[in-house]
């Protein structure tokens, strides 16, 4: 298993309704809910972010294709929206994309560009099988801990809050192996690799600290 993003998108919310701070690999931005939903409209709402993802992915994919074909189309613009309705107790969602090109295109080009747009990565994600997984990071420091050390760092495992998401064993199998005893081999990878994989643990069951500190 390999994640699409090297650094996951991180978001947080405090007591102010409903201002959220979103951190991505190269900065941060504010998201919010519209005033009609109780927010202050200080940033894009979740539906806007979703539609922005589809729109920008479509534009980038089209630009790559157009440049490769060496077609002269200086600018592409897009409008995205969605609507939903109920059918047989299921919610059906339809995404609309309205594309506009800054110069005329042939019918053949139009047909091909629609095909390319429908196969941009976010389009395929939305049309594919999607599985959501939610893990809660537990801040409780009273649970049982087990320690695994190398020369540089100590990995702390809290078995009682481990949800066995599989991120560790698939991400760094040379270190994390449920069939081995001990199941964490601290010599199986460099310390920086181990730290990065431990940081990906969604529940806090795995943490690490430098050996210069004393684990509590």
Image (cartoon, rainbow, N blue to C red):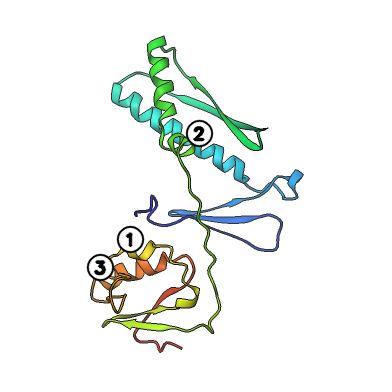
In the picture shown, does residue 43 fall above or below 168?
Answer: above
Q: Nearer the viewer, residue 198 or 58?
A: 198
Question: Which secondary structure lies at badge 2?
Answer: helix
Q: Position of residue 29 (x, y in %)?
A: 55, 52
In the picture shown, does residue 188 fall above or below 59?
Answer: below
Say which residue appears at 29% left-offset and 26% top-offset.
68
Q: Position of residue 117 (x, y in %)?
A: 43, 27
Q: Residues within 10 Å of mark 1 (few under 14, many from 20)?
A: some
Task: Please name the residue that numbered disc 2 is placed on.
Answer: 55
Question: Which secondary structure lies at badge 1?
Answer: helix
**Disc nearer the start of the sequence (2/3):** 2
Say which residue appears at 48% left-offset and 84% top-offset.
144
Q: Residues within 10 Å of mark 2 (few under 14, many from 20)?
A: many
Q: Which mark is residue 174?
A: 3
Say which residue appears at 27% left-offset and 81% top-offset.
150
Q: Position of residue 11 (x, y in %)?
A: 55, 57
Question: Which secondary structure lies at badge 3?
Answer: loop
């Amino acid at each position: 298993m390999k994640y699409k993003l090297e650094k996951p998108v991180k978001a947080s919310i405090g007591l102010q309704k409903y201002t959220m701070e979103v951190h991505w690999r190269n900065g941060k931005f504010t998201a919010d809910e519209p005033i009609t939903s109780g927010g202050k409209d200080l940033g894009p709402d979740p539906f806007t972010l979703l539609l922005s993802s589809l729109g920008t992915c479509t534009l980038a994919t089209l630009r790559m294709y157009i440049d490769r074909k060496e077609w002269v189309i200086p600018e592409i613009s897009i409008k995205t929206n969605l609507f939903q309705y109920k059918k047989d107790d299921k919610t059906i969602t339809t995404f609309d994309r309205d594309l506009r090109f800054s110069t005329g295109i042939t019918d053949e080009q139009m047909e091909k560009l629609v095909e390319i747009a429908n196969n941009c990565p976010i389009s395929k994600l939305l049309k594919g099988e999607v599985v959501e997984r939610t893990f809660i990071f537990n801040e409780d420091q009273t649970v049982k801990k087990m320690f695994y050390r190398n020369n540089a760092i100590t990995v702390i495992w809290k078995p009682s809050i481990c949800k066995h998401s599989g991120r560790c064993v698939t991400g760094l199998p040379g270190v994390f192996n449920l069939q081995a005893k001990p199941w964490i081999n601290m010599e199986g990878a460099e310390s920086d690799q181990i730290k990065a994989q431990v940081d990906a643990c969604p529940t806090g069951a795995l943490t690490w600290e430098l050996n210069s500190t004393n684990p509590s």
